Image (cartoon, helix red, strand yellow):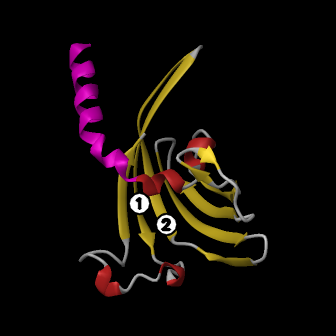
Amino acid sequence: MKTNLFTFAILAAVSTPLALACDLCSIYSAQEAQGGGQGFYGGAAEQFTHFGTLQDDGQKVPGNGEYIDSSVTQIFAGYNFSQRFGVQFNLPVIYRSFGSATLHASESGIGDASLTGSFLIIKKSAPDWMFNWTALGGIKFPTGDSGRLDTPDSALPDGIGGHDLALGSG
């Protein structure tokens, strides 16, 4: 038992820096939501956020009606090879409307696609609790339009601007 606890503590400590790769946080994980099983799956997940309050030092201040409405729909398809291992492809479709009391505009398009894999390391359950520890890894493809960011390629550090690799556990 002490060996298992020691191994768990070492694995948790080693994976902590990798968990900071927060690109994984924005990916809808149907692998986790469906609870296992084998075969193909697919669907869509939606997140809508309205930003309409102007604040200064945490206090609401009068504005000019500025707002941003952000809708991100993730279309996903994946395959679970077993109850422990699966892959998933995500394509975010983004719509944003923004403006003020006098100006309104909107933009839409696809975001950066991603391909992720997950491996269920530990699965423990009892009648009143459950513990799952899953390792995630993925690659992000630059399919989105970064024109609004106005960042010249020369301003990016070496190694940035192409594909991203993300690792983590949770």
In the picture, the quarter occupied by the C terminus is top left
Residue kind at label 2, given as amino acid type: Ser
**What is the number of the mark on residue 114?**
2
Residue kind at label 1, given as amino acid type: Gly
Residue 8 located within the stretch drawn in magenta: yes
**What is the number of the mark on residue 46?**
none
Element marked by disc 1: strand
**What is the number of the mark on residue 138?**
1
Residue 158 image point, x, y percent: 23, 77
- The picture quadrant where one finds residue 50 is bottom right
Give the crowd class for mark 2: few <14, some 14-19, many >=20 residues within 10 Å. many
Q: Residue at x 56, y 72 (%)?
A: 111
Give the crowd class for mark 1: few <14, some 14-19, many >=20 residues within 10 Å. many
Instruction: Name the dominant secondary structure of the magenta segment.
Output: helix
Q: Residue at x 36, y 78 (%)?
A: 162
Magenta region, residue range: 1-21
Closer to the camera, 26 or 165?
Answer: 26
**103 above or below 115?**
below
Question: N-terminal of the two: label 1 or label 2?
Answer: 2
Closer to the camera, 84 or 132?
Answer: 132
**17 above or below 117?**
above
Residue 116 image point, x, y percent: 46, 59
